[in-house]
Image (tube, rainbow, N blue to C red):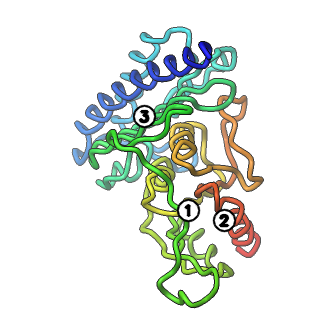
Amino acid sequence: MADADDAQSSYQRDLDLIADLAAEAGQIALRYFNKDPQVWMKEGDSPVSEADFAVDTFLKENLLKARPDYGWLSEETDIDDHRLEAQRTFIVDPIDGTRGFINGMSQWCVSIAIVENGRPYAGALDCPVLKEQHLAAAGMGARINGSQCKARILRDSTEGAHENGRKTICLTGPRSFQTRFDRDVPHTVVKDPFVPSLAYRIAMVACGQTDVAVARASAKDWDLAAADLIAHEAGAMLTGLDGQPLQYNCQDVRHGALVCAHKTHQNEMLDYVRGAMNNG
């Protein structure tokens, strides 16, 4: 029991650390928001801005100063495999949703997770434009701005409610994926507007704002780790198409297509997404 208490106390201390620094980092990013920051294009036609670099520098300096024995993995830092030898590792996306950030959209966030044995145990998403902070620690639940958040169970559809078992599914994800998803789904599908941050799309499921989030293959650890824990602690699941939990801080940080939904409906949603991909 003492060991469990010690672990929870350690998780809480680390969560407090990343929550505070994520909030500070969000304010740094805001200094560049809607100010025409300098932008470069990375491999794969992915943009990065001077705001990304400023936040990354701030977080790396301050997180590793506080926890010098932790490993480091960030989208905007060259990958150092020494992280694989660390017991615990920070996984950071300085600005998740950079393209939306550059275009003046509000749904972008600073994402910080701490991973041990391949899974996150502390996660923070700070969304400064929306004035939202999503936090979770393993076994301690998920919160948004201090209030508990829970993924929602699919509800009866108001459209065709007489049909046995018909539900309403609110779906967020790439537009091309949304189009394919509902071809053979025996429910009412409501397609949410596209959100540029994958981490925020997953957090929307965790907070009951939407039912299902889908993603094409291409996401990296830093896009997912914090949001994965938040979803898990809110009663949802983020998995690959094989239905297995994701593993983080491995040699390969890339992931395949993903689905996030309430754990009660995860298998059903996986079936629909597999079908959409096969028919696409």
Residue 251: horizontal and vertical position, in percent?
Answer: 72, 29
User: If you read the primary sequence from the N terminus, does the residue marked by circle 1 or circle 2 appear first?
Assistant: 1
* Crowdedness near tag 3: few (<14), some (14–19) or many (≥20) residues, C-alpha within 10 Å: many
The quarter of the rendered structure image containing the C terminus is bottom right
Q: Amino acid at mark 3?
A: Pro
* Left or right of residue 187: residue 129: left
The residue wearing badge 1 is 212
For residue 94, which numbered disc appears in the image? 3
Q: Is residue 74 visible?
A: no
Instruction: Confirm or deny contact between disc 2 and disc 3 (CB under 8 A).
Output: no
Residue closer to the observer: 88 or 110: 88
Disc 2: which residue: 269
Q: Secondary structure at mark 3?
A: strand
Secondary structure beneath dot 1 equals strand
Q: Residue at x 52, y 72 (%)?
A: 155
Q: Kindly identify the amino acid type of the residue bearing the numbered disc 1.
A: Val
Mark 2: amino acid: Met
User: Which of the marked residues, 2 or 3, is nearer the chain's N terminus?
Assistant: 3
The part of the image, by quadrant, that contains residue 118 is top right
The image shows residue 26 at horizontal and vertical percentages of 31, 35
Marks 2 and 3 sit apart, C-alpha to C-alpha, by: 30 Å
